[in-house]
Amino acid sequence: MTPLDSSVQAMIIDALSQVSSKKVDSLYEEQAIASLGLDSITVMEMVGVLEDKTAHRFSDEEMARVETFGDLSALIRPFIKS
């Protein structure tokens, strides 16, 4: 499995820690978001945190295509301020 880019991974893990008690040390491109066993509300809360961090609102159409952490990474990467 391919690990996520470290800055994107840190942002996603931080967002996840703000909305869930799940402890995650690493995430992988091919890893399904569903593999963490999060309910849909928690996933949407995590996305909300990522939207705040990137100052970008992701459309429902964009989110509908997100199944893996690699998909999520590709979606948020262009909006990360370096």
Image (cartoon, rainbow, N blue to C red):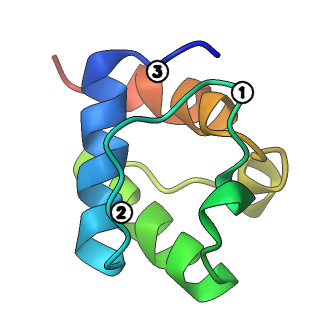
Measured as percent of width and height from the top left, residue 32 is found at 73, 46
How many numbered circles does the render carry?
A: 3
| Residue appearing at x 27%, y 41% in the figure | 11
Q: CA distance from mark 2 to mark 3?
A: 15 Å
Residue 55 seen in render: no
Contact flag, marks 2 and 1 (Cβ < 8 Å): no
Q: Which comes before the other along the chain, label 1 or label 3?
A: 3
Measured as percent of width and height from the top left, residue 13 is found at 31, 49
- What residue is shown with label 1? 30
Of 12 and 37, nearer the camera is: 37
- What residue is shown with label 3? 4
Classify mark 2: residues with Cα within 10 Å, few (<14), some (14-19) or many (20+). Answer: many
| Residue appearing at x 32%, y 62% in the figure | 23
Residue 65, by quadrant, is top right
Q: Quadrant of the N terminus?
A: top right
Q: CA distance from mark 2 to mark 1?
A: 18 Å
Q: Which comes before the other along the chain, label 2 or label 1?
A: 2
Measured as percent of width and height from the top left, residue 46 is found at 43, 67
Residue type at mark 2: give it. Answer: Leu
Of 42 and 78, nearer the camera is: 42
Residue 11 seen in render: yes
Classify mark 1: residues with Cα within 10 Å, few (<14), some (14-19) or many (20+). Answer: some
The vertical placement of 64 against 74, above or below, is: below
Of 69 and 2, nearer the camera is: 2
- Relative horizontal placement of residue 59, taking residue 28 as reference (left or right): right
Label 1: element kind = loop
| Residue appearing at x 60%, y 38% in the figure | 69
Q: Residue furthest left?
A: 82
